[in-house]
Every structure is written in structure tokens, then in C-alpha cells.
Image (cartoon, rainbow, N blue to C red):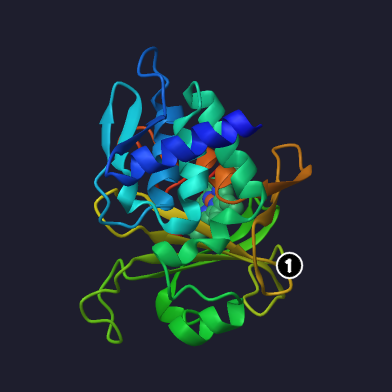
Amino acid sequence: MLERLWWMSAFVSSLAMGESLKIPIGDVTGGKERALHTNLFLVRYFLPPETSIEVRSGMAELPVTSVPEDLKPFFLDLSQKKNYLEVMKAFLEALKQGKYNEHRSIHYPWLPDTREKLEGLLGYRQARFLSFVKKLSLVKGMSRAVYELGAQPDEKFPNGLQPEISIAETLETVEGDLKAKVRETEVIVARDGDSKDYDFYVYGEDGKLTTQSKFSSATGREYVANTPFRCLTCHYSPSTQTFDLTPLAGDSTN
Ligand code: HEC
């Protein structure tokens, strides 16, 4: 234990001199890019948008000075992992502990902790922002209303809104009734910087920002999906290799 502590403190002080951290994020052979992009997505999420990250031979290299102080132990630990699978496991554990929502202010200082505040901020529940209503969303087993802001210029936002936001409300109806009770509100927001990724949030039934959302499988079985990891499984674009608005799996017809 003592030896490990000594070793850690020697490591921390050598890093303090402006060295870079190397984190194994993926295996670059054999079509495993998806795992690499998931890890890279998560590395970027926890760092300020201006951070320069180099990806070389399956390693993400970044200046240790760019890591927020409270996340340094976590990033040091990631840099000690033997391979990208261990890194992914460490991320999953961190997400389970709530680090995702907790650190949202790195990219989205304005993202509130309740749906009510989000509605107050964006006023999105209006016909002009309504992109589509699905009477029966196959991934939700209920109706779903999707509001999009920012993609198109609007009288309130003549130059479009930055960042671009999509809000999907699961409604407790299968008739597409917009007045039905909202079971959950899911948000996808375009990430700043040049990653071209999107980020994923959920407000639960009680209106509070949460990490879990209910989905329905092809056989109608309900399951709980955790942000952002489960969201990433469907919202990935193999062509651009980024995490996208447009889902990969599921039916997208009305
Ligand atoms: C099982 C696959 C699947 C998972 C997991 C998933 N989605 Fe989706 N998502 C879809 C599909 C399919 C649509 C298109 C609308 C529909 O059919 O319900 C969609 C649409 C959306 C939209 C509207 C996008 C638009 O067109 O503007 C948002 C917002 C959204 N999802 C958020 C999330 C969040 C947040 C998570 C993680 C909690 C998530 N999704 C997880 C499949 C998925």
C-alpha cells in the first residue's frame, strides 16, 4: 500500500511537469472502431472542448494540464489501464456512479436539473418546434413527440440555435395525444468543439435529470437504458463514426 502510494505520488509529480497522458482507447485492427469511438467520445466528454487530443495507434494522448482538477485521479487511473476494454469498464463504473450528469457543465453549463427549467429556458413545447409525432415508437412502446431546435432558422432564433437540440418526449398514450402525461424527456444536444458528436440526457417521470430511461424491446419487454452508454448503442453513425441524432437501430417510420 505504502509502496503504491509512493509510486502514485512520484507519478503525479512527474505529470505535473506538463507531460501528456496516454489512454488506451481502442484496438485499431479488425473493425473495432466502434469501441474506439465510444472511448474517445467519453474521454472528450470529460475534458474542456478546447483540449487537443491526439489519437495514435489506439491511444488517446492529451496534456495532463487540460484535465479538470477533480477528474485528475480518474484520468490517471485510466492511463494505467492495460487495454481499451479495461478503460471502457472504468468508464462504465464512473457513469454508474453518476459522473456523467455531474460533469455536464464542462460542455453544457446551461443544462438545468429539471425538465420544468428546460422548458422555461427553451420554450420547446410549441408546434413550430415539433418535428414529428410517432403514435407508436417501437423503441418506447408508446407515443413519442420530437421537438427540434436550432437545425432550422426560426423567428425566435433567426440564425438557428447553437447548439442544436433535439427533445423527445415519451407520452403515455398510443394515440399521439400531445396533452398526454410525459413519461420521460430525452435530450440530444450537439457537442461544442469539432468532435461532431452529440450528447444524451434524460429527465425522468418526476421531471428530474436522471441517468435512466425505459425502453421496449422488439418483443415488448421493458428494459432500463442508462445514459449515455445505452444511447450510444443505437445512436451511432458508422459512416461518420460519430454519435448522432439519427439512430442506427429501430424503426423510423410512423
Ligand atoms: C434501442 C435503440 C435506441 C436506444 C437505446 C436509444 N434510442 Fe433514441 N431513438 C431511437 C429511435 C428508433 C428513434 C426515432 C424515434 C422513434 O422511433 O422513437 C430515436 C430518437 C431519439 C431522439 C429524437 C431524435 C431526432 O430525430 O431529433 C432523441 C432526442 C433520442 N432518441 C434520445 C435518446 C437518449 C437520450 C437515449 C439514451 C437514454 C436514447 N435515445 C437511446 C432509438 C434508440
- Crowding near the residue tagged with mark 1, few <14, some 14–19, many ≥20 C-alpha atoms within 10 Å: some
- Compared to residue 157, the image places residue 221 above or below, namely above
- Residue 157 visible from this viewpoint: yes
- Compared to residue 123, the image places residue 19 above or below, namely above
> Is ligand 1 closer than 8 angstroms to the Cβ of mark 1?
no
- State the residue position of label 1: 172
Residue type at mark 1?
Glu
Residue drawn at x 27%, y 44% is 18
Q: Nearer the viewer, residue 222 or 196?
A: 196
- Residue 245 visible from this viewpoint: no
User: Residue lying farthest right?
Assistant: 221
Q: Please state the horizontal and vertical placement of residue 50, each as a whole percent of the image.
A: 25, 56
> Residue 106 occupies which quadrant of the picture?
bottom left
Residue drawn at x 59%, y 51% is 227
Residue 15 shown left or right of residue 9 in the figure: left
Residue drawn at x 28%, y 82% is 157
